[in-house]
Amino acid sequence: MKFRDGRIQLTVYLAGGLFIAAFAAMALGILAVQQRIVGVTHETRDVMVPQFLAQIRVVRNLEGLRHYGSLAVKGADPQVRRDAAYLAALIAAHPSSQSDEATRALVAEANGHVQSIVAGVGPAVAWPPMEDLLTARADALSVATGNLVLERATDIRDDSLLVRNLATALAVLFVSSMVVMVFLGRSLVVQLRTKNQFFNEASHDFRQRLHGMQLLINTAQRTPLHNAPAIVSKVKAATADLQRYLDNFLELTRLEAVVVRPVFNPVVLQDVFQRLELQFEEAASHRQVDLKFRYTRASVHSDERILLRLLENLISNAIKFARGRVLVAARPRLGRLEIWVMDDGEGMPELPQLGLFEAFVQGSNAKRVGTSDHGFGLGLSIVMRAASLLSARVQVRTQGGRGSTVKVVFKTAVD
């Protein structure tokens, strides 16, 4: 079993924070664009529309002046010509406030031509070029006014589309966040259930061992003194069994904690092998197991403390289930390092490799050993967690009646 609920909780918090930040950013973006649309609408109503109307009036005055000038120049009736000249003078006398200086100058010049032609002091041939200038000016103002209207309408349309797109993205983000949070929530529930099962099983095993010790103590109280050494030996074995159980349980829970962070440094494997050889010398002798460490010059970048704990569990398991030999060796290969722990025990044929690394799972060879030292199913789980912290890979090759080989492959470069 692997505790991942801490990491899942952290993932839930990070995902929730990111989703909330994205929601807030999009909501603020929508509000900002909507406010901009409102501002553009008000500006169009209060500023642009009056300007549009004034521009239209300028264009209308230019068209009117061109028409009145034509009547004044080409009209047969003298009264019509005089009326046309009067209206042309009226337009020139009241120019639109939105007309620019060039337009006002053109209007004044055109009116002067009309008045001189009607008064008979100016040539009629001078009017057609002026009429063309008025027409061109009116067309230019009409096009500019149309472009201004089109530009403002395009801005409003683009902002509206942006609001729609942001609202769509917000909806998609909401749905996606709900799916992700539901998935993470279910994963967290599964991990919490697994963790509860782990502690329930650990509690059951712990109570079993305490109950066994209580029975032994009660038996010792009723046993004659000449039989006391045998009972004391059993109590001692039960106490050692409970101590190993607590050590393994506490180590696994410590390794599963999110706060564990390995510190990588160059580690000389021969020094590690010598420490392990001294540590397991008595245990191997007690079980009549020939424990051998093959000399190596290899080094690896690793956390020495976690590496020691990993190898301790592998060697302890190997000694526990070996018939008579255990070999520990290291071999550099293709820039990597492989550490082998081999025993000649019965092997574990009925369990898949992944199942071997679950807490409280034991292979068939565990049943061969006496009840006072039958293993807890925690060692290989500790190995897998420690290997994960060291970015190493664990491979198990086991066959019934022919022993087991555990290989730990480190991906870090070998010195």
Image (cartoon, grey):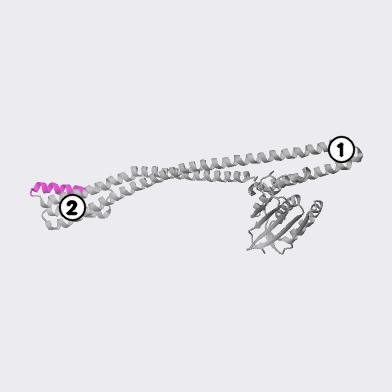
Q: Tell me residue 69's x, y (percent).
A: 15, 51
**Membership of 81 in magenta stretch:** yes
Q: Is residue 234 visible?
A: yes
For disc 2, the neighbor class at 10 Å (few under 14, some 14 to 19, many from 20) is many
Quadrant, the N terminus: top right
Q: Assign a secondary structure to mark 1.
A: helix
Where does label 1 land, which residue? 220
Which residue corresponds to the image point at 55% horizontal and 45% vertical from the top-left?
15
Q: Quadrant of residue 188?
A: top right
Q: Quadrant of residue 372?
A: top right
Tell me: 210 left or right of 359. right
Eye-nearest disc, 1 or 2: 1
Quadrant, the C terminus: bottom right
Q: Assign a secondary structure to mark 2.
A: helix
Q: Nearer the viewer, residue 223 or 88?
A: 223
Q: Which mark is residue 208?
A: none
Residues in magenta, as a range: 76-92
**Membership of 342 in magenta stretch:** no
Spatial distance from mark 1 to mark 2, Cα to Cα? 133 Å
Above or below: residue 249 compared with residue 125: above
Tell me: 270 left or right of 19. right
Q: Tell me residue 136's x, y (percent).
A: 22, 54
For disc 1, the neighbor class at 10 Å (few under 14, some 14 to 19, many from 20) is some
Count of marks overlaid on the render: 2
Where does label 2 land, which residue? 111
- Dot 2 amino acid type: Asn
Which residue corresponds to the image point at 76% horizontal and 52% vertical from the top-left?
323
Which residue corresponds to the image point at 36% horizontal and 43% vertical from the top-left?
41
